[in-house]
Image (spheres, grey):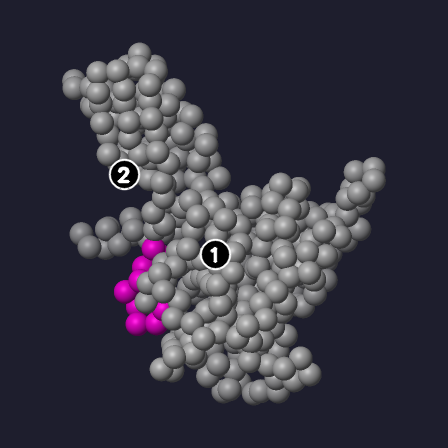
Amino acid sequence: MTKEEVVLKALSTVMDPDLNKDIVSLGFIKDLKCEENKISFSIQLTTPACPVKDKLKQQAHDAVVSCTGINDVEINMTAQVRSFGLEDKTLLTGVKNIIPVASGKGGVGKSTVSANLALALAKKGARVGLLDADIYGPSIPKMLNLTQPPMVSQNTIFPVIKHGLKTMSMGFFLKDDQAVIWRGPMLGKMVDQFLNDVDWGGLDYLVIDLPPGTGDIQLSLCQAIPLTGAVIVTTPQDVAINVARKAILMFNKLKTPVLGVVENMSYYECSKCGERDRIFGQGGGEKTSKEFDLPFLGEIPLTSPIRQSSDDGNPVVISAPESSEAKAFISIAENLAAQISIKAMQKEETDIKVSF
């Protein structure tokens, strides 16, 4: 065996725990170079937000050192987000994955979750857009402290960019004292305009903050474009869980995958003593996930920093990236990215089988 073959054989023992395959058969190993006293290669993951990136790098390093005895091993970690088959569509050309964030009811912190998840993915190095589709109550511009309207040129709208995140919202076009009083056809037209007339450019992920409920906007969106999958946001108490189930059932009926459930306001943690109080109950989000056989993406605490940072227009993922609150959002973003990669790979395998 050549040295390259020996190295690849060793690397084939390193498994991606989410995709359940080794990194060689997945095609992750790129630019392998074997010199006399040095070995270098890249590991190209399916997302820069891979939750086991560091673990895979260490395992690959140890495997190569063990089989070759060469300690000088240089590993470059890269990522190429896989498409869910959306790039060839007429709408949203260049957007690889579209993820609506939904809830069955208002008041569960869906917009806060949407903004922080999108920012967390962007901080990991992904190309991310955030569409505020909550026409009646657009809050994303305030959460991101966006005061300048988007540029418009030749009937094309260009998203506002901040923190590396491309953002579009109805809030850019409304005055503070102006309310949206629209019926279904006008809502559908606005969704169509956000999809057709906005130049999103190349994106790995487009996160869409939906309005609460199961109404016209959700229906228009699901019918207009193929969605990678939805994220359901709920709080622990029974009344929120019961409505979250309806949102899941809506997406099932519309044949849109659900990528997982996020439980917001899971517990209150005292800033002085650190004691946790499950004031809204416990385990509701995880129970719902098990009921529908869905991934539980994680839980987010109820804390003042999350609320304050959103009100200040500087979300906690940006303002306090090392805080426990930010780490909760980042962990959920990583779990979400992993689920998208799993869905994309499953689709690729299905397409291959169908082609034969």
Which amino acid lies under the numbered mark 1 shown in the image of this protein? Gly
Q: Residues within 10 Å of mark 2 (few under 14, many from 20)?
A: few
Q: Quadrant of residue 3?
A: top left
Name the residue carrying label 2: 27
Please provide the residue range marked out in magenta.
83-92
**Circle number at residue 137:** none
- What residue sits right under mark 1 in the picture? 164
Q: Give coordinates of residue 108: x percent, y percent.
A: 68, 61
Residue in view at x 69 percent, y 53 percent: 306
Where 345 falls versus 65 (above or below)? below
Circle 1 packing at 10 Å, graded few (<14), some (14-19), many (20+), is some
- Residue occupying image coordinates x 80% and y 43%: 271
* Mark toward the start of the polypeptide (1 vs 2): 2
Q: Quadrant of residue 214?
A: bottom right
For residue 90: magenta? Answer: yes
Depth-wise, is mark 1 or mark 2 nearer the camera? 1
In reply to whether residue 52 is colored magenta, the answer given is no
Q: Residue furthest right?
A: 272
Depth check, front residue: 60 or 272 = 272
Element type where label 1 sits in the image: loop
Q: Quadrant of the N terminus?
A: top left
